[in-house]
Amino acid sequence: MKKYLEVALGIFTSIGGFLEVGAIATTAQAGAQFGFRLGWVLLLGTICVIFLVEMSGRLSAVSKHTLQDAMRERFGAGFFLVTTIPGLIVDWLVLAAEIGGVALALQLVTGIGYQWWAFPVAIAGWLFMWKGSLGLVEDGVALLGLVALAFVVAAVKLHPPVPAVAAGLLPSLPRAEGATYWFLAVSILGALISPYLFFFYSSGAIEDQWDENHIGSNRFTAIVGMGFGAVLAFGVMLAAAMVFHPRGIEVERYEQVALMLVEPLGRPGLYLFAAALAVTCFGATLEVALGRAYVFAQGLGWNYTLNSPPTNSARFSLVYTGMIGSAAVLIALGIDPLALTVFSMALTAVTLPLVTLPFIVLMNDPAYVGEYRNGWIGNAAVVGISLLASLIALVAIPLQLMGG
Amino acid sequence: MNLTRDILDQQVVDRTGQRLGKVDGVILELREGEPPRIAAIEVGPVTLARRMHPRLALWVEGWLRRLGPKSDGTLRIPWSKVRAIGVDVRVDLVADGTAARAWEEWLRDHVVRRMPGTPQ
């Protein structure tokens, strides 16, 4: 019974980690501008993230190391310092985007500008971490996050043409607007494959003291949890493709994104959209801030834990405090949250190989995973997809900045 | 035993289970006519920075000595205190009050305890 409960919780946790502001914004824009034609990117990203989440859990269960502990140990101090800086910058921007997502959801419902919500959102998130009630948040986000099913309901009610949707699952070259097509493609990959998720997940596995017996349930959690998140994200893309694409509407503001639920679901659609955006982004806000605090604490060997008061892990607690406080400033200053989101997701894609390539080395090192080494399919999928994402992003970001 | 594989960059844990830091450096003793042996392990940001560049280490040390607890956070642990090397390096001492925890304790007393909403 306890095992089933663990799996259920794992699935819920991964919903919070998968569908957040990045996935909602990028898939909505992709659907609006290119219809179903970027479906294959969603499929590719999902395959990659399933492999990576499964690997994070397996690494921790077998080696008893978190991902960051193992990286510092295996690749040394220089590697740690060199990869920490770009990771910190990208996570900081992503964190601001997530805070912006919650703030915008509140703006949709209250009419008060999103800038004013930046600090209240940051303080609420901080209090949950500081008071050590993360379990409550995880379960709450997981359960409330089910409102995101509204996207799937909307997509089904809009009756998307099945052959066209299926055709989108096969890679195709853009007919026009190539720079935007590839920029959105890598933004989707960056939104789905988020390094903070792996650091967070492997730390959770260590805090819950997983061992070899968890390998089976871990694989199940990765496939079902991430697969479920992918279905939700796919719902966003389909709904956007059906509502916006035929009318040639490009999504430039979050208020527009809400319309894709209003058309099929009526007025409640607006509230469902705001709730889904707020809940998923709030969950992601905590995961990003904690993920980065874990990276520092584990990379430098500090105490870290959420199971006791912050006085037992002062440096760890101050890292997430500083992260969430400074990221809120960016939103309070009035930076456009949608543009920030898509841009930070594309930047995530650029930096992916910095995490995934060493990760793959660890997963093939018998000193860490013994007989539970990666198979060639997992290796090939992760290396291929993350290198592809990074290379396309390196080309697409400058093109988008010049053209956009 | 392989120094860089089994010791360097491993987690150091004290007698009470506190995380002290990483093995940022290993100190070898050179002996006349005999093979060198490990004298101590060193924990701390200055030791870590020295592995990148000596100037970075001076810069880090300067700031750490000027701010907060005015400690550079370097702790040298004699090899005789090392009890076990497995997932972590276990050492026979108590971290509290040592240089390795100087910043942690200073931040705890001067910042964390003074924040509103800190559970005491």
Image (spheres, coloured by chain):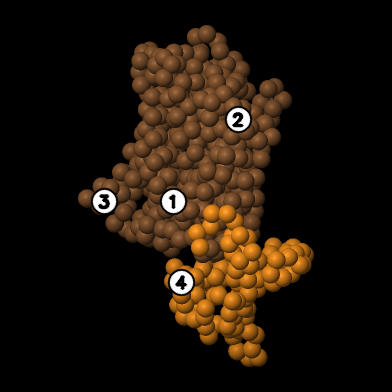
Chain colours: A brown, B orange
Kindly report the distance in space between the C-alpha atoms of the residues bearing marks 1 and 3. 22 Å
Q: Is residue B112 left or right of residue A8?
A: right
Graded by Cα atoms within 10 Å as few (under 14), some (14 to 19) or many (20 or more), the crowding at tag 2 reads: many
Provide the chain ID for the residue under circle 1. A
Q: Is residue B93 above or below residue A20?
A: below
Kindly tell me whether residue A366 is visible in this rendering.
Answer: no
Residue pictured at 60% horizontal, 40% vertical: A119
Graded by Cα atoms within 10 Å as few (under 14), some (14 to 19) or many (20 or more), the crowding at tag 4 reads: few
Q: Is residue B118 above or below residue A31?
A: below
Q: Is residue A2 above or below residue A74?
A: above
**Residue A296 position within the rendered picture, expressed as x and y whole percent measured from the top left:** 57, 57
Q: State the SS at label 3.
A: helix
Q: Is residue A84 left or right of residue A271?
A: right
Kindly report the distance in space between the C-alpha atoms of the residues bearing marks 2 and 4. 44 Å
Kindly report the distance in space between the C-alpha atoms of the residues bearing marks 4 and 1. 23 Å
**Residue A51 position within the rendered picture, expressed as x and y whole percent measured from the top left:** 41, 43
Residue pictured at 59% horizontal, 51% vertical: A321
CB under 8 Å between callouts 1 and 3? no
Q: Which residue is mark 3?
A: A3
Q: Nearer the viewer, residue B86 or A171?
A: B86
Kindly report the distance in space between the C-alpha atoms of the residues bearing marks 1 and 2. 26 Å
* Marks 1/2 same chain: yes
* Marks 4/3 same chain: no
Provide the chain ID for the residue under circle 4. B
* Marks 4/1 same chain: no
Query: Which tag is nearer the camera, tag 1 or tag 3?
Result: 1
Q: Which residue is mark 1?
A: A133
Q: Which residue is mark 4?
A: B17
